[in-house]
Amino acid sequence: MAEHVYLLTLFLPLGTVLLIFGMKYYAAVQQAKARLASDDAYRQVAEQAVAAQAETAAALADLKIRLATIEKILREVE
């Protein structure tokens, strides 16, 4: 009976320490996964912003061309 108690006093603290370290590393892995997902979301938002900016620049260039055409027509009318 004393041998069982002796083994329990050895293995329970050791098991507790191993469990704590295991939980710590598991939490670190989960945080890394969450950070990766967050980075991917930011990357997608940045890509959408770049696409919107390119679309806006194209629309602005088209608007400038139209405005120049209208100014040319108005000068010819005068």
Image (cartoon, rainbow, N blue to C red):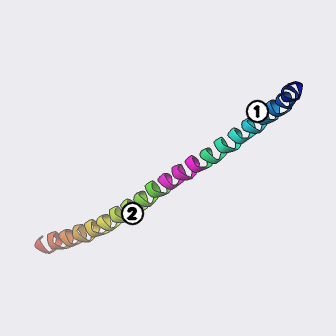
User: x%, y% of residue 75?
Assistant: 17, 71
Where does label 2 land, which residue?
51
Q: Is residue 34 above or below residue 53?
A: above
- The label on residue 16 is 1
Sequence order check, earlier mark of 1 and 2: 1
2 left or right of 60 in image:
right
Amino acid type, callout 2? Ala
Residue range highlighted in magenta: 33-42
Between the C-alphas of marks 1 and 2, the distance is: 53 Å
What residue lies at 52% left-to-right and 49% top-to-bottom?
A: 38
Amino acid type, callout 1? Thr
Q: Residue furthest left?
A: 77
What residue lies at 64% left-to-right and 48% top-to-bottom?
A: 29
Q: Nearer the viewer, residue 51 or 65?
A: 51
Q: Secondary structure at mark 1?
A: helix
Picture quarter with the N terminus: top right
Q: Nearer the viewer, residue 74 or 27?
A: 27
**Magenta stretch holds residue 35:** yes
User: x%, y% of residue 14?
Assistant: 82, 35
User: x%, y% of residue 61?
Assistant: 31, 68
Majority secondary structure of the magenta segment?
helix
65 left or right of 19 in image:
left
Q: Nearer the viewer, residue 7 or 31?
A: 7
User: Residue 57, located in which quarter of the rendered image?
Assistant: bottom left
User: Residue 51, located in which quarter of the rendered image?
Assistant: bottom left
Picture quarter with the C terminus: bottom left
51 left or right of 25 in image:
left
